[in-house]
Image: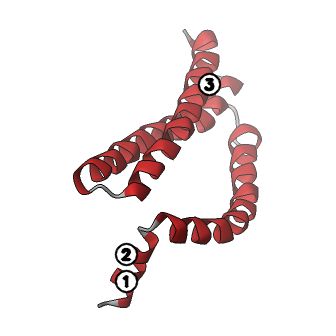
Amino acid sequence: MNPVIRWFHQMGSPPTFHRFAARWSPWLLWASLPLMLWGAWSGLFAVPADYQQGDSYRILFIHVPSAWMSLFIYGLMAVYAFIALVWRIKLCEQLAMACAPVGAGFTAITLLTGSLWGKPMW
């Protein structure tokens, strides 16, 4: 069997995947945290104000990516749920359940930033 296919089959087992994820999660967290902070700082402070909307335009640099992420995560959750229902892969059930609170968090950020931007604009 191809080593890549064998690796994917091994990662389909929840205990194997959880060991792998537990080992990589701290490294990925510390790698992504500075990038997220830099992106938020760049979007909120480094970008010049818009000539029509002023400083409230900058909130769109948080609003639009969070809207895209919420839609992406809910789509991913649907794919995981479909795979779990059709092929009975237990890891996909866990991943679908893990996507729900993350998607809800991004949706809350989207609604909050949308209302903060929309109040002075409309």
Residue 22 in view of the camera: yes
The residue carrying mark 2 is: 9
Residue 50 in view of the camera: no
The residue carrying mark 3 is: 113
Quarter of the view holding residue 46: top right
Which residue is found at the position 62% from the left and 36% from the top?
Answer: 62
Q: Earlier in the sequence, mark 3 or mark 2?
A: 2
Q: Nearer the viewer, residue 93 or 46?
A: 93
How many residues crowd mark 3 within 10 Å: few (<14), some (14–19), many (20+)? Answer: some
Q: Nearer the viewer, residue 78 or 51?
A: 78
The residue carrying mark 1 is: 6
Q: Which mark is residue 103?
A: none
Question: Where does the image place residue 75, in percent across and percent down from the top left?
Answer: 36, 43
Q: Is residue 6 left or right of residue 24?
A: left
Q: Tell me the quarter of the image containing the N terminus.
A: bottom left
**In the image, what residue type sits under mark 1?**
Arg
Quarter of the view holding residue 51: top right
How many residues crowd mark 1 within 10 Å: few (<14), some (14–19), many (20+)? Answer: few
Q: Is mark 2 in CB contact (under 8 Å) with mark 1?
A: yes
Question: Where does the image place residue 88, in percent across and percent down from the top left?
Answer: 29, 55
